[in-house]
Amino acid sequence: MRRPGAAAACGALPRAACSPSAPRAALVLLAGLILLALLAPPASPWAFDSLDWRHLAQPPELTAAHWFGTDRLGRDLFVRTLHGVRLSLLISLLASAIAVGLGVAWGALAGLVGGRTEEVMMRFVDVLYSLPYLFFVIILSALLGRGSVAVLLLAIGAVGWLTTARIVHGQTLQLKRREFIEAARATGLSTAAILARHVVPNLAGTVVVYAALTVPQMILFESFLSFLGLGVQEPYASLGNLINAGAQEMESAPWMLLVPAAFLVLLLACLNLLGDGLRDALDPREH
């Protein structure tokens, strides 16, 4: 059965959003957003934790000192939002690398070895899937400390690698029946050598596509945890805790919610369009 991709979803989207140029435009916009997040905070006269007592909860105004307004403590919202984009991207990229690396190793090994080892490894994945995610995060927070980067990476990566392992496991089961795998076994290559030389390289297209689609999921996880107060803590800024702070001030200071929420939507839209473009380019079944 053909997997649903960007092309399958085009019926629910405007024609312009489904054109081949959409991923290229998303890449350009994403690159601009990343450059802005990297360069604008150091160039600004305001740090992400600078307090401006003369402009408390100032609304956005292009002629003012704070173009996107300030929060209740007078901190520049534009600088804090870009700091949040940078921190959210960094944590999500690291968590995605952990999730994809662990998932590929686990799923490929289980699929290639087979037998009782495969059964035990994949049942372990099923057990972890059944555990309540928030309960797992709370336990990690109690053990390692709330707001720790290690907690975020472990909590987010622990979700992502399970799906990766299942996908890679299924792909490996198909590969192990191919003649070149049988030939490699006949020559006496070890399991590790077969994985490194034959299995993982043939999974590269699937892994690259899934890794690209995993990053926006990791950003959502990180934002969700920070929104709940289990992720990045004040005075550091994450898109999640900025949206949480803005939601509490929605009636009196709506820009505190709208600015970080708009950046989060833009970031996720660019990453998802880019991931769909990679899937269409690397999966011939999409054409």
Image (tube, rainbow, N blue to C red):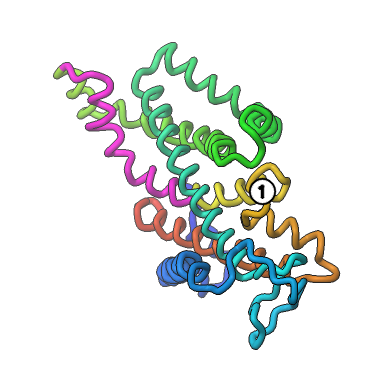
Question: Would you name the residue on which mark 1 appears?
Answer: 233
- Tell me which segment is drawn in magenta: 188-213
How many marks the image carries: the answer is 1
Q: Is residue 12 visible?
A: no
Seen in the picture, residue 148 relative to 185 is either above or below; the reply is below
Q: Residue furthest left?
A: 187
Q: Main secondary structure of the magenta part?
A: helix
Residue 167 or residue 220, whichever sits in front: 220
Q: Is residue 142 visible?
A: yes
Task: Tell me the quarter of the picture where residue 235 sits.
Answer: bottom right
Residue 285 or residue 47, whichever sits in front: 47
Q: Is residue 173 magenta?
A: no
Q: Secondary structure at mark 1?
A: loop
Residue 13 or residue 277, whichever sits in front: 277
Q: Residues within 10 Å of mark 1 (few under 14, many from 20)?
A: some
At x 64%, y 65%, the residue is 50
At x 49%, y 62%, the residue is 273
Q: In the picture, which quadrant includes the C terminus?
A: bottom left
Q: Is residue 192 magenta?
A: yes
**Percent of width and height locating residue 174:** 35, 31
**Percent of width and height locating residue 40:** 50, 71
